[in-house]
Amino acid sequence: MLFPVFLGQRVPPETLASTLAELDRCLQLLEDKFLKDQDFLSGPHISVADLVAITELMHPVSAGCDIFKSRPKLAAWRQRVEAAVGEDLFQEAHAVIMKAKDLPPADTAMKERLKPLAQLLLQ
Amino acid sequence: MGLQLYLDLLSQPCRAVYIFAKKNGIPFELRTVDLLKGQHYSDDFAQVNPLRKVPALKDGDFTLAESVAILLYLTRKYEAPDHWYPQDLQARARVDEYLAWQHTALRTSCTRTMWQKMLFPVFLGQRVPPETLASTLAELDRCLQLLEDKFLKDQDFLSGPHISVADLVAITELMHPVSAGCDIFKSRPKLAAWRQRVEAAVGEDLFQEAHAVIMKAKDLPPADTAMKERLKPLAQLLLQ
């Protein structure tokens, strides 16, 4: 999202595909190794681990990747976490990232500043 | 069955766990997982750690992955002396801060340095473009500067006046590029002095013992075709 929309830079389809495959692999580990059949990542109650995980997953979601669509177990966990946090607070924390796709394109100064980070993230 | 630690001393975090357990007299059964032979991909090992990485811990029916989690579990269970993970709020926060930062900073650049400077040419017989190695060494240098300026500062150890798990994690990390022939301590007297203090606190014999495998890595026989195939995906990642 940020490369095409914000920096006006094309991302090779194979790069994106490789990244999405890696994301998928991590999500599978999240489900199988960490969440398993529990309500939350460390057991029956929400912990800081769930906060770190949910805020992480909202990143690709805000980029238009509906990662929860094909993963009902994670979707159910997400509902529990949002309920435990409280809907208002959850929306408030994610207001900025959910509007990232509406960011005006970066100007030249911003592009220059983000160049080294951008190179790193395109590998 | 007692505590089992699944380790390959080729790996930086495994060395930190090994040193910690030995130094604190924690009884454990060492289960060696040979990374170069791909033993971490076996089905048996996946039962211990589905993430297929070392170090891993098995304590009765309880299995645990991730070196930081393992170090802290051992600290708590065996009630290690306070300085390893101090009770003091801010001292502990400093240790936590280092442990969190190092994964994606120093760990990454030390692993890449080891592979690009030594394992690729010597073990895999693969050429590394000079500009790739130069870029990796520059990043390593940047991390070392942060280690000195942000974490060590004018203290004796990373979190203050006493050695903690942060120092173990850091020193085992830095021995990686050292064993690849990068004398990172030569131009950094502050870090060199800290290294001496850490080695003295750990004990020379235990320090040498933990690093015996990695210091001999440059004498590894070249990988056979099967090994090269197995290491291909990892190799691609480490050459970027």
Image (cartoon, rainbow, N blue to C red):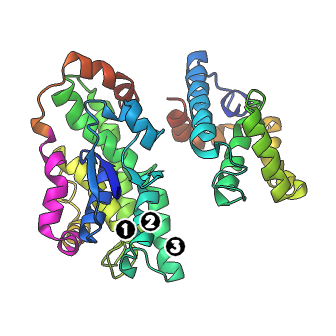
Answer whether residue A105 is visible to the viewer in this image. Answer: no
Q: Quadrant of residue B186?
A: bottom left
Q: Is residue B205 magenta?
A: yes
Find disc 3 in the rendering and name its residue.
B93
Q: Pointers 1 and 2 in contact (CB under 8 A)?
A: yes
Q: Is residue B19 magenta?
A: no
Amino acid on which the number 1 mark rests in the picture: Val
**Chain where mark 3 sits:** B
Q: Residue at x 64, y 42 (%)?
A: A36
Could you say whether the residue bearing mark 1 is in a helix, strand or loop? helix
Rendering coords of residue A72 (x, y %): 77, 33
| Residue B216 disc label | none
Q: Pointers 3 and 2 in contact (CB under 8 A)?
A: no
Magenta stretch, residue numbers: B197-217
Q: Which mark is in front, 3 or 1? A: 1
Find disc 2 in the rendering and name its residue.
B72
